[in-house]
């Protein structure tokens, strides 16, 4: 995919501060430090569009980014163009902050996922090295009750030897009780799965709400 522009819009704590409905949206969620920001930066071909931190739980607001991209033709020319709004949700599973703060984050995420009209799909990121954790399974079960398309992304595949990657993706699919082809392997460090993920995002974002 050829990235034409990638712009940060706003960090929003409340529904009143969400940007107006515009391009179709795909939200990214996952455990704290699963690699959401690195994934978004890789997709946007920017080093710091989304803030990357080694400290879990740093993303505490809903962050909106507009990415204007074009497909590459076989000759390398610009093909069909797409505008997708990528949305970075706060990570779950991190104990930092008071119970009141954590409850507020959860309410903020639930309100966005259930009430955002322009949201087309939810991308659930799981750690490709560790595999799905209990709170990933809880998030998956709840996500399936939503009227949104669901994408599963296994991050950090570069931490596994190449000979173990496919078998690990199969184990992840088995644990999540989904077909192997529904798990997208990804690595921001080695750009594994970038094109495949972009194709999935475009298909999901251009489908019905």
Image (cartoon, rainbow, N blue to C red):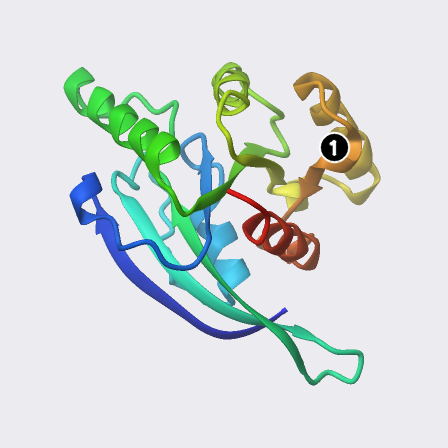
Residue 135 versus residue 189: which sits nearer the camera? 135
Which residue appears at 40% of the width and 62% of the height?
66
Q: Quadrant of residue 61?
A: top left
Residue placed at 59% from the left, 23% from the top?
A: 132
Q: Nearer the viewer, residue 154 or 161?
A: 154
Residue situated in front as seen by the camera: 3 or 131 = 3
Say which residue appears at 53% left-offset and 34% top-offset: 124
Residue 108: quadrant of the picture: top left
Circle 1 crowding by C-alpha within 10 Å: few under 14, some 14–19, many from 20: many
Q: Does residue 90 appear in this view?
A: no
Q: Is residue 62 visible?
A: yes
Task: Look at mark 1 in the image and give the residue it sits on.
Answer: 169
Number of labels in the image equals 1
Placement of 195 over or under 134, stated as above or below: below
Residue 2 lies, with reference to residue 41, above or below; the image says below
Residue at the extreme right: 163
Q: In the rendered view, tell whether residue 103 sits above or below residue 5.
A: above
Q: Position of residue 143 (x, y in %)?
A: 50, 25
- Residue at image x 63%, y 32%? 129
Where residue 39 sits in the image (x, y, percent)? 52, 51
| Position of residue 90 measured from the top left corner of the image (x, y, whole percent) | 34, 36
Give the image location of residue 86, x and y in percent.
44, 53
Question: Which SS class for mark 1?
Answer: helix
* Residue projecting furthest to the front: 208
Locate residue 14 relative to residue 134 in the image: left or right: left
């Amino acid at each position: 995919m050829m990235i034409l522009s990638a712009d940060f819009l706003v960090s929003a704590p409340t529904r009143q501060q969400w940007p107006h409905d515009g391009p179709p949206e795909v939200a990214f969620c996952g455990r704290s430090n699963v690699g959401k920001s690195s994934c978004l930066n890789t997709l946007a071909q920017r080093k710091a569009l989304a803030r990357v931190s080694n400290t879990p739980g740093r993303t505490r607001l809903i962050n909106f980014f507009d990415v204007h991209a074009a497909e590459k033709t076989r000759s390398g020319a610009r093909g069909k163009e797409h505008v997708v709004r990528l949305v970075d949700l706060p990570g779950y599973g991190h104990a930092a902050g008071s119970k009141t703060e954590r409850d507020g984050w959860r309410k903020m995420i639930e309100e966005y996922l259930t009430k955002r009209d322009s949201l087309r799909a939810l991308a659930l990121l799981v750690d490709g090295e560790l595999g799905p954790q209990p709170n990933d399974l809880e998030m998956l079960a709840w996500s399936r009750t939503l009227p949104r398309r669901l994408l599963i992304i296994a991050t950090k595949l570069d931490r596994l030897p190449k000979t173990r990657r496919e078998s690990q993706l199969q184990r992840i699919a088995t644990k999540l009780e989904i077909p192997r082809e529904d798990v997208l392997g990804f690595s921001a460090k080695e750009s594994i799965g970038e094109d495949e993920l972009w194709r999935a995002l475009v298909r999901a974002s251009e489908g019905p709400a």
